[in-house]
Image (cartoon, helix red, strand yellow):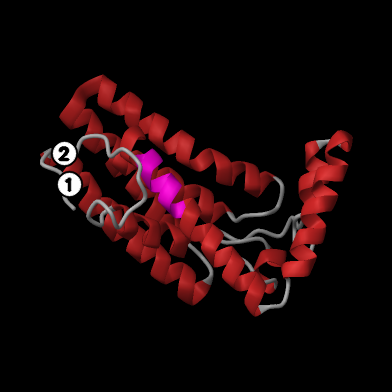
């Protein structure tokens, strides 16, 4: 589904290309290259500045920050890779805030389904439930300690460029570059096939 607004249609096509490239890279290498994400952020900010002026730049910046924030928190706690943060920032800058939030909802839904599938395939459902219960019980001791219990192999400081932590690469987990690409394809489907979320600018 392509919107009538030429700027948004252009942004969506660019975002789709970036997301698919990131998804393929994440699938085959477990990494999302900086050469893809950084230029995409710049292009997104430039596109919205040229077409919408300062308000467009502000919304593109907001999109980049809001979409990246959940993954930045995951990165700080050792649960996601730096590439996840950067690809979501890039897609947020390209799509701007409103459509970016729609993408975030779809991508998180895909990520949740992927996580469940991975847990089932690796026989980790019981372990996941146990960690969830312990996380709730440990919350009074601080969020960092509590959320650390959700990591499969514990926190690690070994992060590669644009990739996942060393522990995340060894342990079963969700490669969010793939989830972001599938989420973007999903949100572009006709009404009734995508999630019932308002689509700004359509």
- Residue at (61, 72) in percent of width and height: 118
Residues at circles 1 and 2 in contact by the CB criterion of under 8 Å: yes
34 vs 168: above or below = above
Q: Where is residue 47 in the image (x, y as percent from the top left)?
A: 22, 37
Q: Relative to 133, is 93 on the left or the right?
A: left
Q: In this view, does 49 lie to the left or right of 124?
A: left
In the image, is 140 to the left or to the right of 97? right
Q: Position of residue 6 (x, y in %)?
A: 11, 41
Q: Tell me the residue that label 1 is attached to.
A: 10
Q: Residue at position x 51%, y 65% from top?
A: 31
Residue under label 2, please give it. 7
Residue 131 location in percent, x, y? 80, 57
* Along the viewing direction, whichever of 72 and 127 lies nearer the viewer: 127
Question: Please, what is the dominant secondary structure of the magenta stretch?
Answer: helix
Is residue 121 placed above or below 62 in the rendered structure? below
| Figure quadrant of the C terminus | top left
Range of the magenta residues? Answer: 100-107
Instruction: Tell me the residue at 41%/66% (across/down).
Output: 23
Within 10 Å of disc 1 (Cα), the crowding (few <14, some 14-19, many 20+) is: some
The extreme front residue here reads 192
Element type at mark 1:
helix
Q: Picture quarter containing residue 192?
A: bottom left
């Amino acid at each position: 589904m392509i919107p009538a607004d030429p700027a948004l249609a252009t942004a969506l096509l660019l975002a789709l290309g970036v997301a698919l490239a990131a998804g393929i890279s994440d699938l085959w290498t477990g990494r999302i290259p900086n050469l893809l994400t950084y230029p995409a952020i710049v292009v997104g900010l430039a596109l919205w500045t040229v077409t919408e002026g300062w308000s467009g730049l502000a919304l593109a910046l907001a999109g980049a920050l809001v979409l990246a924030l959940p993954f930045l928190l995951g990165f700080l706690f050792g649960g996601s890779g730096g590439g996840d943060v950067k690809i979501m920032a890039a897609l947020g800058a390209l799509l701007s805030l409103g459509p970016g939030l729609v993408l975030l909802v779809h991508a998180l839904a895909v990520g949740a389904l992927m996580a469940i599938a991975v847990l089932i395939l690796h026989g980790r459902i019981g372990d996941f439930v146990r960690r969830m219960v312990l996380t709730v019980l440990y919350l009074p001791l601080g969020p960092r300690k509590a959320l650390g219990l959700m990591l499969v192999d514990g926190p690690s400081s070994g992060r590669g460029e644009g990739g996942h932590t060393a522990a995340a690469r060894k342990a079963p987990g969700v490669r969010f570059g793939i989830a972001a690409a599938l989420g973007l394809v999903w949100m572009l489907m006709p009404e009734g096939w995508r999630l019932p979320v308002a689509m700004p600018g359509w």
